[in-house]
Amino acid sequence: MSACLEKLDISGIRSFSPELNQGSVELMTPVTLILGPNGTGKTTIIESLRYVTTGQFPPGSKGAGFVHDPKIAHETEVKAQVRLRFRNTQGLASCVTRSLIATQKPKGVTVRSLDGVFQMRALNGEKAAISSKCLQLDREMVAHLGVSRAILDNVIFCHQEDSNWPLGESKQLKQKFEDIFACTRYAKALDNINSICKKNVIIPVIYAMIELIYVEFSW
């Protein structure tokens, strides 16, 4: 079963107000079409989807340009939050929340990430909440969405500034395709099979073939 995105809540990101429940987007199936004049936040929606699923900021922002400017809010500190409600690969209702705090200082704005929260409703109806570090949350999202980090970054939520990467230099293009198709994992599995075959050992070869099949269907 494929994961399905249902609703995105944005607060304190770029032009979206820091007030909670001020920016909500219902995500339709199979397609959601977002229309609007320049500067109304269309790109911010995609950036927020990428951030909440991968933890990655937009290119060149390093967080400061991503969070609502404290000066505009007339505050010394602004809290930003992105929440995504979705159905995971098992069809279970899930919700992930990532939060940031931007603080205005004499030399500029500093941004700090808070621990994220992942919630999921089990088959018996019970609701479980897991508060985790950003790296742990990144791994959880890949597992529950059933899509690799490389595909989320470079295909599904690819930023418009990076969307021309298929026309880039051959070295960069090779690396992108290796990441997307997990070529390195295939190569390592095949090398393992070849080294075992040279020893003329049958049972380890069978296990190595199982490993290769697992690599093919797990990414």
Image (tube, rainbow, N blue to C red):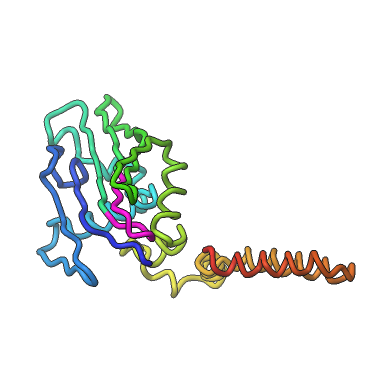
Residue 126 vs residue 129, the one in the foreground? 126
As drawn, the residue found furthest toward the right would be: 199
The answer to which quarter of the image holds residue 38 is: bottom left
Q: How far from the left and from the top, in percent, is residue 117?
A: 33, 39
Q: Residue at x 12, y 37 (%)?
A: 19
**Above/below status of 161 relative to 78:** below
Q: How far from the left and from the top, in percent, is residue 69?
A: 20, 38
**Above/below status of 70 relative to 219:** above
- Count of numbered circles in the view: 0
Q: Residue at x 31, y 46 (%)?
A: 96
As drawn, the residue found furthest toward the front would be: 124
The answer to which quarter of the image holds residue 31 is: bottom left
**Above/below status of 105 relative to 38:** above
Pick the quarter of the image with the N terminus. Answer: bottom left
119 is within the stretch colored magenta: no
216 relative to 130 in the view: left or right: right
Q: Residue at x 33, y 42 (%)?
A: 63
Q: Residue at x 12, y 67 (%)?
A: 35
Q: How far from the left and from the top, in percent, is residue 85?
A: 25, 52
Residue 192 vs residue 62, the one in the foreground? 192
For the magenta stretch, what is the residue range? 86-96
Q: How far from the left and from the top, in percent, is residue 42?
A: 18, 60
144 relative to 14 in the view: left or right: right
87 is within the stretch colored magenta: yes
